[in-house]
Image (spheres, grey):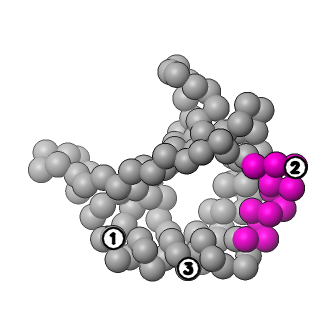
Amino acid sequence: MIYELRIYHAFPGKLPALNARFSNHTLKLWERFGIRQVGFWTTAIGESNNDLYYILEWENLAEREQKWNAFATHPDWLATRAETEKDGPLTTHITNLILTPTAYSKMR
Protein backbone atom coordinates (compact mmCIF):
# COMPACT_ATOMS: atom_id res chain seq x y z
CA MET A 1 0.00 0.00 0.00
CA ILE A 2 1.19 3.52 -0.77
CA TYR A 3 -0.25 6.84 0.30
CA GLU A 4 -0.46 10.12 -1.53
CA LEU A 5 -0.32 13.31 0.50
CA ARG A 6 -1.70 16.27 -1.41
CA ILE A 7 -1.61 19.82 -0.06
CA TYR A 8 -3.76 22.41 -1.78
CA HIS A 9 -2.50 25.91 -1.07
CA ALA A 10 -5.63 28.01 -1.48
CA PHE A 11 -5.74 31.66 -2.40
CA PRO A 12 -6.74 33.79 0.62
CA GLY A 13 -10.51 33.57 1.03
CA LYS A 14 -10.87 30.58 -1.34
CA LEU A 15 -10.57 27.71 1.16
CA PRO A 16 -14.35 27.56 1.79
CA ALA A 17 -14.96 27.21 -1.96
CA LEU A 18 -12.29 24.52 -2.19
CA ASN A 19 -13.85 22.60 0.71
CA ALA A 20 -17.28 22.93 -0.90
CA ARG A 21 -15.98 21.55 -4.19
CA PHE A 22 -14.60 18.48 -2.44
CA SER A 23 -17.65 17.84 -0.26
CA ASN A 24 -20.27 18.57 -2.93
CA HIS A 25 -18.62 17.27 -6.09
CA THR A 26 -15.15 15.73 -6.04
CA LEU A 27 -15.78 12.96 -3.50
CA LYS A 28 -18.80 11.73 -5.46
CA LEU A 29 -16.68 11.56 -8.61
CA TRP A 30 -13.90 9.75 -6.77
CA GLU A 31 -16.37 7.08 -5.66
CA ARG A 32 -17.20 6.39 -9.31
CA PHE A 33 -13.50 5.87 -10.07
CA GLY A 34 -12.66 3.87 -6.94
CA ILE A 35 -10.37 6.56 -5.52
CA ARG A 36 -10.03 5.98 -1.76
CA GLN A 37 -9.48 8.88 0.61
CA VAL A 38 -7.93 8.36 4.04
CA GLY A 39 -8.86 11.80 5.35
CA PHE A 40 -8.88 15.56 4.93
CA TRP A 41 -7.43 18.19 7.25
CA THR A 42 -7.10 21.95 7.59
CA THR A 43 -4.59 23.74 9.79
CA ALA A 44 -5.72 24.73 13.28
CA ILE A 45 -2.25 25.86 14.35
CA GLY A 46 0.62 26.22 11.92
CA GLU A 47 2.10 28.19 9.05
CA SER A 48 -1.02 28.77 6.95
CA ASN A 49 -4.75 28.46 7.48
CA ASN A 50 -5.23 28.55 3.68
CA ASP A 51 -4.06 24.97 3.17
CA LEU A 52 -6.10 21.80 2.70
CA TYR A 53 -4.33 18.49 3.33
CA TYR A 54 -5.59 15.11 2.27
CA ILE A 55 -4.32 11.58 1.86
CA LEU A 56 -5.30 9.01 -0.74
CA GLU A 57 -4.63 5.28 -0.47
CA TRP A 58 -3.40 3.24 -3.43
CA GLU A 59 -2.45 -0.40 -3.92
CA ASN A 60 0.50 0.71 -6.06
CA LEU A 61 1.61 3.39 -8.53
CA ALA A 62 -0.07 1.62 -11.44
CA GLU A 63 -3.46 1.85 -9.72
CA ARG A 64 -2.84 5.51 -8.96
CA GLU A 65 -1.90 6.31 -12.53
CA GLN A 66 -4.89 4.51 -14.02
CA LYS A 67 -7.56 5.85 -11.64
CA TRP A 68 -6.18 9.37 -11.23
CA ASN A 69 -5.74 9.89 -14.97
CA ALA A 70 -9.25 8.58 -15.67
CA PHE A 71 -10.67 11.01 -13.09
CA ALA A 72 -8.52 14.00 -14.11
CA THR A 73 -9.54 13.77 -17.77
CA HIS A 74 -13.21 12.88 -17.30
CA PRO A 75 -15.68 15.45 -18.74
CA ASP A 76 -17.68 15.59 -15.47
CA TRP A 77 -14.57 16.60 -13.51
CA LEU A 78 -13.45 19.09 -16.14
CA ALA A 79 -16.90 20.73 -16.12
CA THR A 80 -16.97 20.80 -12.30
CA ARG A 81 -13.53 22.36 -12.11
CA ALA A 82 -14.42 24.97 -14.72
CA GLU A 83 -17.66 25.87 -12.95
CA THR A 84 -16.06 26.12 -9.50
CA GLU A 85 -13.21 28.22 -10.86
CA LYS A 86 -15.30 30.58 -13.01
CA ASP A 87 -14.23 33.45 -10.72
CA GLY A 88 -10.59 32.39 -10.79
CA PRO A 89 -8.48 29.49 -9.55
CA LEU A 90 -8.95 28.26 -6.00
CA THR A 91 -5.32 27.31 -5.37
CA THR A 92 -1.97 29.00 -5.82
CA HIS A 93 -0.29 25.60 -6.19
CA ILE A 94 -0.49 21.98 -5.12
CA THR A 95 2.15 19.97 -3.28
CA ASN A 96 2.08 16.24 -3.98
CA LEU A 97 4.02 13.47 -2.21
CA ILE A 98 3.89 9.68 -2.63
CA LEU A 99 4.62 8.04 0.73
CA THR A 100 5.44 4.46 1.66
CA PRO A 101 4.91 3.27 5.23
CA THR A 102 7.86 2.32 7.38
CA ALA A 103 8.11 -1.16 8.91
CA TYR A 104 6.93 0.25 12.26
CA SER A 105 4.03 2.32 10.90
CA LYS A 106 0.52 1.58 12.16
CA MET A 107 -0.69 2.13 8.56
CA ARG A 108 0.76 -0.36 6.08
Residue linked to disc 1: 61
**In terms of secondary structure, where does tag 2 sit?**
loop
Query: Of 2 and 69, which appears nearest the observer?
Result: 69
Say whether disc 3 or disc 2 marks the residue closer to the N-terminus: 3
* Residue type pointed to by label 1: Leu
Give the left or right position of residue 46, taking residue 11 as reference: left
Q: Give the range drawn in magenta.
A: 78-89
Asked if labels 2 and 1 touch by Cβ distance under 8 angstroms, the answer is no
Residue linked to disc 3: 70
**In terms of secondary structure, where does tag 1 sit?**
helix
Q: Which residue is drawn at 73% across and 31% down?
A: 12
Q: Which residue is drawn at 56% across and 79% down?
A: 70
Give the left or right position of residue 59, taking residue 89 as reference: left
Query: Of 86 and 104, which appears nearest the observer?
Result: 86
Q: Distance between the residues labelled 1 and 2?
A: 34 Å
Q: Residue at x 52, y 75 (%)?
A: 69
Work out which residue is located at the far right of the displayed protein and give it: 87
Give the left or right position of residue 25, taking residue 86 as reference: left
Looking at the picture, does residue 99 appear above or below residue 34? above
Q: How far apart are marks 3 and 1 (CA)?
A: 14 Å
Give the left or right position of residue 1, taking residue 35 as reference: left
